[in-house]
Amino acid sequence: MRIDRFHHSWVGSQSSAREWLEQFMHYYNRQRPHQALDGKTPIEEVQN
C-alpha cells in the first residue's frame, strides 16, 4: 500500500519506487547514525 501511494508522486516506475524505498530503508536503519540513539544506527541499538 505504501509503495502504491509513493508511486503516485514518483516520476519513475513502480518497481523503481520500490527499489528507491528499499535502498532508503537500508540507509536509514543500517548506516545513518541517529541523534536520539546516541549516534548509533537502529540496527546497532536492536542488536545490543
Image (tube, helix red, strand yellow):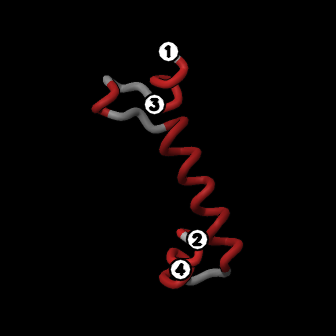
Earlier sequence position, callout 1 versus callout 2 = 2
Residue at mark 4: 10
| Residue depth check, mark 1 versus mark 4: number of the one nearer the observer | 1
**Residue furthest front in the image:** 1
Using the image, tell me which numbered label, if any, was put on residue 48: 1
Viewer-nearest residue: 31 or 44: 44
Residue 35 found in image quarter: top left
Marks 3 and 4: in contact by CB < 8 Å? Answer: no
Residue at mark 2: 3
> How packed is label 4: few (under 14 Cα within 10 Å), some, or many (20 or more)?
few
| Residue depth check, mark 3 versus mark 1: number of the one nearer the observer | 1
Q: Position of residue 47 (x, y in %)?
A: 54, 20
Residue at mark 3: 41
Establish if 24 lies above or below 31: below
Q: State left or right for residue 45 relative to residue 4.
A: left
Earlier sequence position, callout 4 versus callout 3 = 4
Residue at horizontal 53 percent and vertical 80 percent from the top: 10
SS class, disc 3: loop
